[in-house]
Image: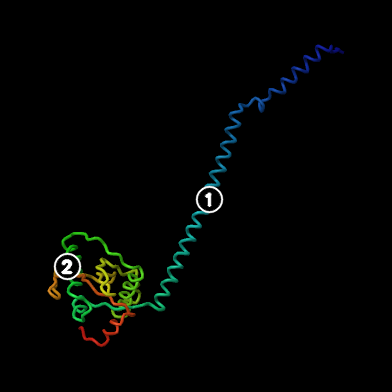
Amino acid sequence: MKKWTAPALGALLLTAYFACACTPEQTEDPSQALQAQVDEMQTQIDELGQKLEEMQGALDALGQENEALREQAGDFEWWRAAPYGAFVSLADAYQLGWLTQDDLTRIAAIQNALYAQETPGPLPLDETAARAIRETRAYALRTNERQPRASYRDVSIDWYYGCYDGLYAAMISDSYTGYHAALWEETIGGVTFRYWDGREISIYVDEDDPRFYELAYTDIS
C-alpha cells in the first residue's frame, strides 16, 4: 500500500479544494445573479402596480356611485318641495308692468347682437335660480304637455339676459319641443327683437314673488 508523504498529501488536498470551489454554481457571473434579482423585483413592482390600478378603479367606481346618490338625493329635495315658478312672454311681462322699456332695450341689445352673430359677454346666473328655471319648465312638460318622464336634465338655458327687479330673462329649450328655423321678429313697447328660429325669450317669476300670484287673477292670454 502506497504511503502518502506530507507534501504529496498537501498537494492532493489543495487540488480537491480548488476542484470544489470551481463548481458551476459558484462560477456564475455575479452580474447575471444581480439581474435576476432586479427582474424579480420588477415583476413584483408590476404586480403591485396592477393591484393599485384595480384598487383605484374600485375607488373611482365607488365615487361615481356616491355622486349619483347625492344627485338623486338633491333631485328628491327638488321634487319634494320644488320652488316651481312660472314663465310669461316678454310682451305679457311688459303689459303687466313688470318690465320697463329700458329693460326691454337692454334685453333686445343682447338678443339682436346674437342675431347678428356677435357674442356678447355671458351674464352670471345663480345656480339655484338656473335650477329653478329648468325645474319649472320640466314641471310644465310633465303636467301640461304630457311628458311624465321629463326632468330638469331635459331642459337647457340657451342664453341668459339678466335679472330685472327679481325677474329672470332667458331663452330655454328642451328635448321634447321642436322649433322652426325661420327668421322672425317682434316689436314690444317700440323695441324690436330679432330671432333666428322658433325659440323666444321668456320671463321667469319665482313662486315666492308676489307677482307670481298676480298671474292667477290676470288675463294675459
Q: In the image as oriented, which residue stretches furthest toward the bottom?
A: 217
Left or right side of 114 for 8: right
Query: Earlier along the polypeptide chain: callout 1 or callout 2?
Result: 1
Three-letter amino acid code of the residue under disc 1: Leu
Q: Position of residue 143 (x, y in %)?
A: 32, 80
Say which quarter of the image contains residue 102.
bottom left
Mark 1, residues whose alpha carbon is within 10 Å: few (<14), some, or many (≥20)?
Answer: few
150, 87: nearer the viewer: 87
Disc nearest the viewer among 1 and 2: 2
213, 153: nearer the viewer: 213
Q: Quadrant of the C terminus?
A: bottom left
- Residue with the mark numbered 2: 195
- In the structure shown, which secondary structural element does the residue marked by tag 1 occupy? helix
- In the structure shown, which secondary structural element does the residue marked by tag 2 occupy? strand
In this picture, is 44 found above or below 10?
A: below
Q: Quadrant of the N terminus?
A: top right
Say which quarter of the image contains residue 119.
bottom left
Mark 2, residues whose alpha carbon is within 10 Å: few (<14), some, or many (≥20)?
Answer: some
Residue under the image location 40 percent in, 76 percent down? 79
147, 73: nearer the viewer: 73
Q: Position of residue 100 (x, y in %)?
A: 19, 75
- Residue with the mark numbered 1: 52
Residue under the image location 17 percent in, 67 percent down? 195
Three-letter amino acid code of the residue under disc 2: Tyr
In this picture, is 36 found above or below 60?
A: above
